[in-house]
Amino acid sequence: MDMHKELGLTDDEYGEICKILGREPNHTELAMFSVMWSEHCSYKSSRLHLKRLPSDAPYVILGPGENAGVIDIGDGLALVMRIESHNHPSYVEPYQGAATGVGGIIRDILTMGARPIASFDSLRFGLPTHEGPAAGGDSTGANEVIAAKNRWLARGVVSGISGYGNAVGVPTVGGEIQYDPCYSGNPLVNVLCLGVMPIDQLQRGAAAGVGNIGLLIGASTGRDGIGGVSVLASSGFDAQDTSKRPSVQVGDPFEEKKVIEACLELFERKLTVGMQDLGGAGLTCATAETAARANTGLRVNLDAVQLRESDMEPFEILTSESQERMFAIVEPGDVEEALAVCEKWETPVAVVGEVTADQSLVVQSQGRIVCDVPPAALDEGVVYDRPARRPERLDALLARDPNQDLPQITERDVPAQLVALMSSPNLADSSWAWRQYDHQLFLNTVMGPGSDAAVLRVKGTSRAIAVAIDGMGRYCRLDPRHGSELAVAEAARNVATVGARPVAMVDCLNFGNPESPEVMWEFSDAVDGIRTASLELALPVIGGNVSFYNETDGKAIDPTPIIGVVGLIGNLSAVPIGIGFRQAGDVIFVVGETGSDLGASEWAWWCHDFVGGSAPSMDYRAERHLHDFLIHIQSERLAASVHDVSLGGVATTLVECALASDLGCQVDAHAWAPQLGLSTALFSETSGRAVLSCVPSQVRAIQSAAHEAELPLWQIGEVSGSQVMGADVADLRAASLTHQL
Amino acid sequence: MIASLANPSLKASGSEGPGPSFVVAVPIFPGSNCEHDTQYALVQVGAETVFVHHSDKALPAETAAIYIPGGFAHGDYLRAGAIARFSPITAAIGRAGADGMPVLGVCNGFQILCEMGLLPGALAPNTQGRFLCRDVHVKVENIATPFSRAMVLNQVLRIPINHRQGRYFADDATLRHLADNGQILFRYCDAAGMVDESDLVHNPNGSIMAIAGVTNENGNVVGMMPHPERAIESRLGSADGRPVLESLVGGSSPGAERE
Amino acid sequence: MGEYAVTVTVSPKAELRDPEGKAIGDALHALGWPAVTTVHVGRTINFGIAADSLAEAQSQVKEMCETLLVNPAIEDYTISVRDAPESALAESAQIGTSS
Amino acid sequence: MGEYAVTVTVSPKAELRDPEGKAIGDALHALGWPAVTTVHVGRTINFGIAADSLAEAQSQVKEMCETLLVNPAIEDYTISVRDAPESALAESAQIGTSS
Ligand SMILES: Nc1ncnc2c1ncn2[C@@H]1O[C@H](COP(=O)(O)OP(=O)(O)O)[C@@H](O)[C@H]1O
Ligand SMILES: [Mg+2]
């Protein structure tokens, strides 16, 4: 087997490399190309499609291309945001997989010049239980052993996010946990991070200025994450001897905290010309990317790199993915002061390189040149337009008729159905998880976990930031395009629900094997959906990530785009109105049209193991008007409670408002959708709706606000007692606590 | 002073508050992370904060009190506070404490003071083995310390905790001495002030005798697991942490609670 | 059925990075023990078990390690099973405890 | 000077009623091993040290425990010091590593 094939490079790719170099690459160069041209680093299967994502708006300072997106939020401040996935490592070792995912996304924010001030986790696992209709039905139904493993994975991932996030000193203020059999072999761990900084502190990942010096800051370099290239190991040990290569990367939040403080002081004292975090493909990527961006070259000396193991070969040092490392470009005159800053914060630092004019990456080790390649060639990688084909299986799924296969329940059934639905893991109380997260550090958290969106005040200003993170895998199984639009709409609606104007989004695209035409069709369709939603809701895509190969035994996960939306509150005078009912006698409304969208609903899946028909319907004009309406309700403080309708329909939304306040309600279940059957009215998941309550004296104000926003509004009942449509709040709470891990 | 994002909006120091500014030294160990929140809270009660590097040998001359902040000194490796106690600054802290200067250790600060031997007992891993970030109620059992003199005996305060190793433990002899000598400052309780060591809802880390904070013999060195600096504004959930800082600067500060 | 005392010693794989071990090593060096090399932190799990034979106990403990006690991706382990003296089962697990 | 392999095992004092041990015990029972009793967990700190003699090494390690490695208020400890085989210092700490 040719060496390049063992490294995952095709013959054509190898041919391309030889053409660029005008010769065959040596071992070190081959290793560098193989990691840089991998799917993970080069986005070769997705780049073509990602170009279709709109990313411009007057306030977007930096869109995709840099380490994180940057937008202007006023008062001379910029917000930096990014989302990344760490799925495969989390399956191997959940604690460290999730922990190093948090560490990595934090460095992507830091490298732009900002202090990371909040992170969010979006997690997906296989079912935590083997009981219930949905558990047995699907092809990868969770039997007892699989369910136990899924619980172990979920506990490990959450404690990894808690362990790393808390110790590194970045509060975890929001997120979501969802379950579906398709994630049993492939958990998804997506982490979003954001930072805020003065605009003039923005750092670019560019090795600009011939003669400037490259510093490697942070942890020592070991054989972590070297993976496939290890077959290149020469005499030191044979390729099969895995004892030398750690199968798992271990994070050190203590080291990262020192790196954060050192880098922030370097920024504040204007000592850096460029900054680049070390992520996938380690030093190779950092040097190639920074030189390529600045159109310069770099001369790198590996002998200066602090190693954790003595006998490391050049290709190992260059492709090591050891954590907690940054690459800074500093002017020669500032090197001494920069080294002193790192010493003050007790984080190792070494001069490892120098910017050259000859646009080539030249790497030296023990007096030998071990690499001389054009950085742009490493950085640009290759681009593929892979074949796509619509999966036939969709026809049967879409043909299923919920109205035929699902019962329209009667009034008598409602209490039991509500309790049954609330025992779904996707509607479970997730405080077992976020109680383990420090969600208060920096004293910015005005609304934290448990609310529709996290709200963070911006100290020294009257502004606040709101962020929500959502994904609708089941919808995308039926219709990747429409499901993606619904995910964007859901995240944006959550942000508007707390009174913030949605302004930008990031997306993390979790899919199966791109070499399967069906997966590529799903991927392309999902990108088109995000494009439409981005244009319709004026939400530029300022960054994101792609994770392919989420499949087990050839079966891919549901197409799962995870969307993070950020919104702004211009003047935060008080804590936004929350989701819990406030007092007995308050009047309850549903705003927005309820359609017949039962087929992909949580009730249909959890209570009847039915997934079919079309994904829920949505109308962009209604979504935009709902944003205006909710922002107005919050700014004028017209309501006592506001909560958007999502998984489980109006029924679940009412239960959540009751659980958040221990106050029940008396409602007429036919009030907001008289033309629909009871099951559909209660559990339909049509987009663009919310549930509000207000004191009687505000009823007219809310009615006129809805009228002005041209939104249908139904008065459906009032806050009272300790039941929701006949189900005791205590029983509903017990059901929602079934899956405490 | 322009507010930098995570740092508090710094009013000109000393311009508010009682008389010449009350200077609090806040030592920062590698891994500490609540120092900015501590500064933000102290500004609210008119006190000035001076950050001190853990490798310094002396405290600033004008230091009137010491506030060891929360965080993860040395990553909480080995034991929370186990390595931090050997930093050069701890000798100066020990001397100041012995001389009667008010010293408050919050969360990681409490762990460090115990490891230094300035406070009795130790903080073991939480009974249920998990990190806890939530509000608790604590009952005030000693109003003669520099950090509780603005409080009323048996007052109940709602303040957040945020730790994995917060379960207070001491042997019986030490506990008897703490009780007899009035060194038990705060105990976890329910909203009505009822203390029950075995109730893991209201004593969530399983501390012995539900102890949440203790003082030294002299009453001037205090350690508490709850974070008063996280309970300064009701807008963020509770303002019950203010009395701890107001006690320190002597009476309640003129500035009304920032809304 | 016999009573056996079990000690499972779990240690992180040698090639894995051990930040806690490094922090302890640095502290020991700083406190005047330069001769200390590569610190690794592991854990022991001690318990009693009733089984038909020593071999039976050993195989049960091996199974416990594989299913719950150890994560083979990052940890190695050794098992020690010994006859538990009838009376002092508890003591046997802590011989040599410092006073 | 000799090379010695050291293992310090630190375990919570009995009065602390070792919640982690109890949690593991409950999990083992739930997974079908009812015969498991009184689970106690300890941390092992493993390192190498050069010293003039075994006794010298032992006394240094005892001092390390009292200065840094152990908090006597809540922990007990045991020390095991053994000759480290010249070449395979690392291996000695993992005799019987599972394949
Ligand atoms: N799904 C996506 N949507 C928008 N931008 C994306 C997406 N995936 C990747 N990008 C952008 O492409 C660039 C390269 O991504 P990546 O190599 O993962 O960044 P890094 O090397 O900093 O981890 C980044 O700027 C990222 O924001
Ligand atoms: Mg990056």
Image: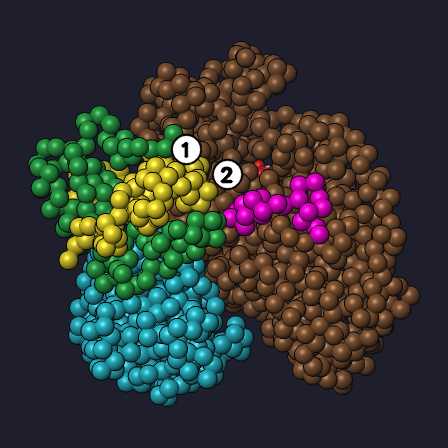
Chain colours: A brown, B cyan, C yellow, D green
Disc 1 target residue: A246
- x then y, percent, for residue D85: 19, 29
**Depth order, front residue of C53/A353:** C53
- x then y, percent, for residue B133: 46, 64
Q: Is residue A398 left or right of residue A125?
A: right
Q: Does any portion of residue A379 appear in the rendered image? A: yes
Task: Tell me if label 1 and label 2 are in contact, CB under 8 Å.
Answer: no
Using a 10 Å C-alpha cutoff, classify the residue at mark 2 as few (fewer than 14 neighbours), some (14 to 19) or many (20 or more).
Answer: some
Q: Is residue A666 left or right of residue A351?
A: right
Taking the view exactly as shown, the residue that stands out farthest to the top is: A23
- Does the magenta-highlighted stretch encompass residue A4? no
- Residue type (three-letter) at the residue carrying disc 2: Val
Position of the N terminus of chain A, as image quadrant, is: top right
Disc 2 target residue: A92
- x then y, percent, for residue A126: 61, 46
Q: Is residue A24 above or below residue A231?
A: above
Q: What's the residue at 74%, 74% (across, down)? A: A726
**What main secondary structure does the magenta stretch of the protein show?**
helix
Q: What's the residue at 69%, 56% (across, down)? A: A491
Q: What's the residue at 64%, 53% (across, down)? A: A131
- x then y, percent, for residue C7: 30, 45
The answer to which of marks 1 and 2 sits earlier in the sequence is 2
- Does the magenta-highlighted stretch encompass residue A142? yes
For label 1, the SS is loop
- Residue type (three-letter) at the residue carrying disc 1: Pro
Callout count: 2
**Depth order, front residue of B102/A714:** A714
Find the magenta span and give its range.
A133-154
Q: What's the residue at 34%, 37% (across, down)? A: C55
Please give the chain letter of the residue carrying mark 1: A
Using a 10 Å C-alpha cutoff, classify the residue at mark 1 as few (fewer than 14 neighbours), some (14 to 19) or many (20 or more).
Answer: many
